[in-house]
Amino acid sequence: MTSDAFNRKYGVIVEESNFRKDESSMRHVEAFLIRRLIFALIIVFLVEMPFFQIQGLLYMQMFYIIYLGLSRPLASNEDNNADMVNESLLMLQVYHIIWFTDFVNEPNFKYAAGWSSVCVTLLQILMNLFRMGYKSVKESVASYRK
């Protein structure tokens, strides 16, 4: 999986994966793609059953976080930790979805939950932007010193 021909053909898909660890970390790309497929199937086929949609999303997210924590599939600890934080914040967003259903009848609570959801999204965006900027500056300084 680390040959030049493989990297030229599939490098973009697997660029941050760590193939030198174990079997579970080698399945990271497959798990990621299957998770996207399951997400689409849940949204499309359970459209009339919002309770099962939310439960499906929660379980899918929970199992993916457990998988990430156990296998640590990315090349660096920093990348693994950032992925865990991103997935945890995404799970928090799925919990917010519960508050926007008909199970909650209080409009003021839904309004506050909406702002909470916006803040969680903004936090995630800012964290990722800061991380990307930090890594870019770090790589630029390292390449300048060479």
Image: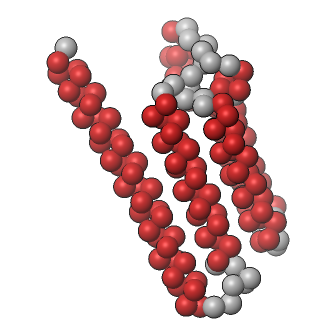
Residue 16 seen anywhere in this rendered image of the structure: no
Residue 126 position, x and y percent, is 37, 55
Q: Look at the image and tell me in which quarter the C terminus lies.
A: top left
Q: Look at the image and tell me in which quarter the N terminus lies.
A: top right
Task: Identify whether 17 is placed above or below 55.
Answer: above
Residue 145 position, x and y percent, is 17, 18
Residue 69 seen anywhere in this rendered image of the structure: yes
Question: What residue do we see at 28% from left, 27% from top?
Answer: 139
Is 132 left, or right, of 35 in this rendering? left
Is 63 left, or right, of 12 in this rendering? right
Residue 132 position, x and y percent, is 35, 41
Task: Identify whether 8 is placed above or below 79.
Answer: above
Question: What residue do we see at 47% from left, 62% from top?
Answer: 121
Q: Nearer the viewer, residue 62 or 144?
A: 62
Is 3 left, or right, of 61 in this rendering? left
How many numbered discs, if any?
Answer: 0
Question: What residue do we see at 41% from left, 63% from top?
Answer: 122
Residue 119, quarter of picture: bottom left
Is 118 left, or right, of 132 in this rendering? right
Residue 45 position, x and y percent, is 81, 61
Question: What residue do we see at 64% from left, 77% from top?
Answer: 99
What's the coloring here? secondary structure
